Amino acid sequence: MDAMAFLSKPGKQVQPIYVVCGDEDFLKRRALAVIEKIVLEDADPAFAMTTYVADAADFSTIRNELDTRPFL
């Protein structure tokens, strides 16, 4: 989906996967902010979300994060 179309009408239903890519950093940041608001609702992002830099992330780190059970 085009970023401008998504930003103008993001929808309320949480999707299983979001992929944000492209050359426009401004649009990517805006799309990520909207996705964060849709997915996390009122939850604190510091506790409910983990982010990684794509160039520095390795598969084992991300896999371990996905295997970790939430403690709350």
Image (tube, grey):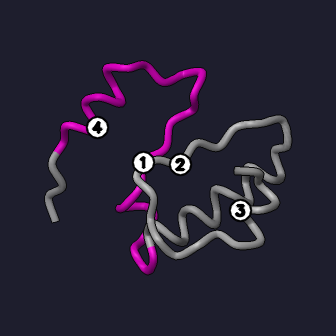
Tell me the residue at 27%/39% (across/down).
66
Q: Are marks 4 and 1 in contact (CB under 8 Å)?
A: yes
First along the sequence among labels 4 and 3: 3
In the foreground, 38 or 47: 38
The alpha-carbon separation of the residues under discs 1 and 3 comes to 23 Å
First along the sequence among labels 3 and 2: 3
In the foreground, 58 or 34: 34
In the foreground, 47 or 14: 14
Q: What residue type is labelled 3?
A: Phe
Q: What residue type is labelled 2?
A: Tyr
Mark number displayed over residue 65: 4
Q: Give the range drawn in magenta.
A: 41-68
First along the sequence among labels 1 and 3: 3
User: Does the magenta run of residues contain 51?
Assistant: yes
| Position of 11 relative to 33 (above/below) | below
Counting other residues with Cα less than 10 Å from the Cα at mark 2, is it few (<14), some (14-19), or many (20 or more)? few
The alpha-carbon separation of the residues under discs 1 and 2 comes to 14 Å
First along the sequence among labels 2 and 4: 2
